[in-house]
Amino acid sequence: MFTSHSRQHAHVEKMRAGGHIGKLVKHPGFDLFFAAVVITNAIFIGIDVQRTTEAATGDRPAGYMVVGYIYTLLYIAELVLRLSAHGLRLFCSDDWMWVLLDCFIVATSVWDVLVDILTALLDENGFESVSGLSTLKAFRVVRVTRVLKIAQLLRIFRFVMALRTLVQSIFHTLKALVWALLLLLLIVYVFAVIFTQAISDYRVDQSAAGEVLPDIVGNDGMLYFGSLIDSMLSLFMSIAGGIP
């Protein structure tokens, strides 16, 4: 009976803790704070990339690495708090795609930190010549975490409703855009067939009559309308202003 009472008490305490965390997560200041974190992190990523590009060795300063670790801890804290407040139901909510994005960002960020720590430990122990370290450094160059850091910028759309509305509007207009491009392709194709056939017939008629082809037909005509592909490309370039 004492054990049952202890379990009930622990369950009540757990529910209270979850309630407090839930209130924290639902508070407008919570989203506002992490929106500021995402925006400042986006700015920091640009500064970090620019600084690394300008460096002769391509190494990141220690201060930049520390700031990156702080952002990683903040992302982990946000994800843990949301999971503590909502549990696995969070993956079945309307924002499940954003939750998966958060998990992906946290996983890649943690992997980035682990690789940095492991590399630093191996360097301190004097294992520069070990083939494993060379492989690790080579993997650092191509590892996906550096490239996929840009995914963190997508979290801005989660907090800025105007951007989300704009992106949704763009996606909704893609269908009309595809049909417009298809119509343009059809028009270009039809006139390409006409021009290519006209140039071909003119060359055949001139050759049959034993006459010399004018330069405008022999050179420019064959250059721009000598084949169907060339004709389509020439017509598209004329639309886009690509032919001098």
Image (cartoon, grey):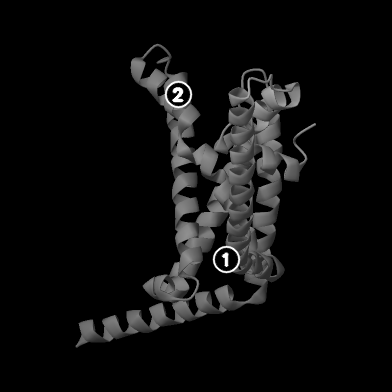
Decide if residue 139 is in sight here.
yes
Residue reaching furthest to the right: 244
Point 58% across, 63% down: residue: 179
Point 56% across, 79% down: residue: 23
Placement of the C terminus among the 4 image quadrants: top right
Q: Position of residue 167 (x, y in %)?
A: 64, 64
User: What separation in Å lies between label 2 and label 1 (alpha carbons)?
Assistant: 45 Å
Q: Residue 175 — which label?
A: 1
Q: Position of residue 172 (x, y in %)?
A: 60, 69
Q: Position of residue 88 (x, y in %)?
A: 37, 71
Q: Which residue is mark 2?
A: 137
Above or below, comparing residue 128 to residue 73 in the picture: above
Q: What amino acid is labelled 2 in the image? A: Lys
Residue mark closest to the camera, 2 vs 1: 1
Residues marked 2 and 1 touching at CB (< 8 Å): no
Circle 1: element type: helix
Residue 125 is left or right of residue 183, and the answer is left
Sort mark 2 into few (<14), some (14-19) or many (20+) by Cα contacts within 10 Å: some
Point 39% across, 78% down: residue: 14
Give the mark, 2 or 1, whose residue is nearer the N terminus: 2
Q: What amino acid is labelled 1 in the image? A: Lys
Residue closest to the eye, 121 or 31: 31
Placement of the N terminus among the 4 image quadrants: bottom left
Sort mark 1 into few (<14), some (14-19) or many (20+) by Cα contacts within 10 Å: few
